[in-house]
């Protein structure tokens, strides 16, 4: 074949892997004319390439075909993959965003799947400028830990803590009280000021110089009682939670319970008073 200038050759717009590219090896030293096939050229390791315009590679693996778009030859072989069945991009390693934001529009969603590929839930933004979470049935959001299948579940009408009834506690701490609110999962009890509630509700004013009552009851409905007790009495039994007057033969004053009265109506002097308490005998 006669010598021909490159500019005089016919141009093509697509190549095959076996096509040959003309290469000038070591152009700044001892230049030699060489060749390389397109497949090997695309595998060549190169560094510090700067594109002054738009770099727009087009990958056409064919219809209904997955394609590896980018692969890095390091531990784990991270890849960016076109997943045809999901009609989207997938990553076989973690995606780390070190600056800026990850943004989705109001029609797109982040889908969560388990290790087996089963759909578990979504996170997306809607047209009302809200972030929406949902499970498989769009009923609830579960926040979980390795110790519990669902430690908090938010669903229509309510928020449930320890939704799977596990032996876990729900605790609210304050500056000076690590057990300001302690709902004990094993004892089925609530402690306020204590981490070991001794009753269904245990309120502990543990600060000796707090100068405040354990309970402060303010009844705005002036026609109603402060406290209502519901119990059961039994004929002739003095150990019930309620004892009818006729069931006891005698009572012995055992002491006095201090309370404080603050009368908003100003008919009773605001002061500390004492309620007597007794032991009973049949």
Image (tube, rainbow, N blue to C red):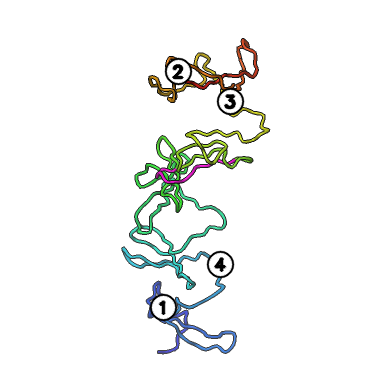
For the stretch drawn in magenta, what is the main secondary structure? Answer: loop
Q: Nearer the viewer, residue 119 or 254?
A: 254
Q: Quadrant of residue 165?
A: top left
Mark sitting on residue 52: 4
Residue 108 visible (yes or no): no
Q: Residue visible at 40% across and 53% down?
A: 112
Mark with earlier residue (3, 2): 3
Spatial distance from mark 2 to mark 1, Cα to Cα?
103 Å
Identify the secondary structure beneath mark 3.
loop
Q: Is residue 39 magenta?
A: no
| Pointer 2 or 1: first along the chain | 1
Q: CA distance from mark 4 to mark 1?
A: 25 Å
Going from N to C along the chain, the mark reached first, 3 or 4, is 4
Real-space Cα separation, disc 3 to disc 1, in angstroms: 82 Å
Q: Nearer the viewer, mark 3 or mark 1?
A: 3
Quadrant of the image containing the C terminus: top left
Marks 3/2: CA–CA distance: 33 Å
Location of mark 3 (residue): 216
Tag 2 secondary structure: loop
- Please tell me the numbered disc located at residue 39: 1
Look at discs 3 and 2 and give the one toward the viewer. 2
Marked residue nearer the N-terminal end (4 or 1)? 1
């Amino acid at each position: 074949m006669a010598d021909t200038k490159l500019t005089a050759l016919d141009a093509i717009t697509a190549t095959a892997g076996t096509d040959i590219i003309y290469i000038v090896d070591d152009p700044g030293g001892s230049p030699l004319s060489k060749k390389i096939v397109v497949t090997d050229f695309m595998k060549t390791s190169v560094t510090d390439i700067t594109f002054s315009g738009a770099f727009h590679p087009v990958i056409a693996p064919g219809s209904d075909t997955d394609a590896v778009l980018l692969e890095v030859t390091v531990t784990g072989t991270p890849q960016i993959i076109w997943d045809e069945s999901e009609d989207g991009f997938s990553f076989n390693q973690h995606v780390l965003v070190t600056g800026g934001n990850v943004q989705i529009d109001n029609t797109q969603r982040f889908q969560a799947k388990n290790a087996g590929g089963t759909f578990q839930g979504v996170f997306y933004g809607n047209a009302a400028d809200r972030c929406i979470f949902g499970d498989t049935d769009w009923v609830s959001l579960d926040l979980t830990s390795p110790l519990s299948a669902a430690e908090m579940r938010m669903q229509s009408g309510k928020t449930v803590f320890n939704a799977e009834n596990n032996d876990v506690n729900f605790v609210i701490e304050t500056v000076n009280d690590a057990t300001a609110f302690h709902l004990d999962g094993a004892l089925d009890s609530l402690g306020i000021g204590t981490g070991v509630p001794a009753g269904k509700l245990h309120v502990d004013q543990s600060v000796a110089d707090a100068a405040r009552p354990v309970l402060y009851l303010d009844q705005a409905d002036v026609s109603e009682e402060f406290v209502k007790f519901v119990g059961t009495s039994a004929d002739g039994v003095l150990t019930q939670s309620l004892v009818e007057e006729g069931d006891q033969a005698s009572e012995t004053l055992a002491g006095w319970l201090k309370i404080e009265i603050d009368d908003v109506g100003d008919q009773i002097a605001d002061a500390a008073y004492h309620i007597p308490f007794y032991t009973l005998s049949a």
